[in-house]
């Protein structure tokens, strides 16, 4: 199942990148930071704009968190996310604000308690550090600050099929997007 998802994700990106209608309008990079479940997350993105309302996105996400329950168990999540986004609303007159929705695949690695199966108290951890995979859906609100720069508020909901941390994992962040050309 994991290999088929990876193959599907790469195939999806290849089709998206070759499905240009009228050429590349722009490429952009972004960086955001914010809330991830139980901690902090940071995301770097590269967007390849297929036209004025569609772009393929490749993101790298890292979360540093701590599961607070009977015991405080630190964990980290590192993922790569190929996806595609579509503009669903844009301010009609000045095109200063836009709302985009999209989604795609997720593949990565989660590290539970720095790879140790026991806590300092001697308790044994049930979960393991492992490769994870799944899908995500996302929303991006963008405010244009200038010709090359925009403010970005991003929210993603991940579904990790085989995670020991939890299947559903949210991320909400704020950052900047810079248009390369």
Image (cartoon, helix red, strand yellow):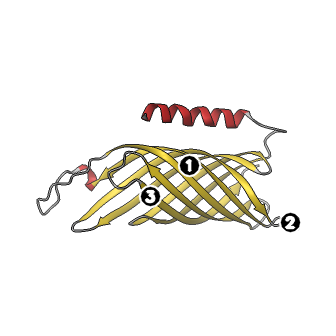
Give the numbered dot on residue 169: 3
- Image coordinates of residue 113 in percent, x first then y, are 26, 55
In the rendered image, the vertical position of residue 48 relative to residue 38, given as above or below: above
How many badges with numbers are in the image?
Answer: 3
Q: Are marks 3 and 2 in contact (CB under 8 Å)?
A: no
Which quadrant would residue 10 be assigned to in this image? top right
In front: 12, or 145?
12
Q: Nearer the viewer, mark 1 or mark 3?
A: 3
**Earlier sequence position, callout 1 versus callout 3:** 1
SS at badge 1: strand
In front: 4, or 172?
4
> Which residue position is annotated with label 1?
59
- Image coordinates of residue 181 in percent, x first then y, are 77, 49
Measured in 3D between alpha carbons, the distance from the residue under mark 2 to the one under mark 1, in whole angstroms, is 29 Å
Residue at the location (59% across, 56% down)? 138
Residue at the location (60% across, 62% down)? 154
In front: 36, or 148?
36
In front: 95, or 89?
89
> Which residue position is annotated with label 2?
92
Name the outermost residue toward the left. Answer: 122
Q: Nearer the viewer, mark 2 or mark 1?
A: 2
Q: Is residue 21 left or right of residue 71?
A: right
Q: Is residue 168 left or right of residue 172?
A: left
Q: Residues within 10 Å of mark 3 (few under 14, many from 20)?
A: some
In the rendered image, the vertical position of residue 86 relative to residue 142, given as above or below: above
Measured in 3D between alpha carbons, the distance from the residue under mark 1 to the one under mark 3, in whole angstroms, is 16 Å
**Earlier sequence position, callout 2 versus callout 1:** 1
- Which quadrant is the N terminus positioned in? top left
SS at badge 3: strand
Which quadrant would residue 142 be assigned to in this image? bottom right
């Amino acid at each position: 199942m994991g290999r088929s998802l990876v193959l599907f994700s790469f195939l999806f990106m290849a089709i998206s990148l070759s499905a240009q209608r009228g050429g590349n309008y722009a490429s952009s990079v972004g960086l955001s930071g914010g809330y991830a479940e139980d901690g902090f997350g940071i995301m770097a993105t590269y967007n390849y704009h297929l036209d004025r309302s569609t772009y393929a996105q490749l993101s790298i996400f890292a979360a540093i968190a701590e599961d607070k329950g009977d015991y405080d168990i630190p964990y980290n999540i590192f993922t790569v996310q190929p996806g595609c986004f579509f503009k669903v609303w844009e301010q009609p007159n000045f095109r200063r604000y836009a709302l985009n929705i999209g989604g795609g695949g997720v593949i990565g690695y989660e590290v539970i308690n720095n790879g140790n199966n026991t806590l300092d108290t001697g308790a044994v951890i049930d979960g393991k550090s492992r490769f994870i995979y799944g899908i995500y859906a996302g929303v991006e609100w963008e405010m244009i600050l200038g010709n090359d720069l925009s403010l970005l508020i991003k929210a993603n909901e991940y579904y990790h099929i085989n995670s020991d941390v939890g299947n559903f994992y949210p991320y909400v962040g704020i950052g900047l997007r810079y248009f390369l050309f």
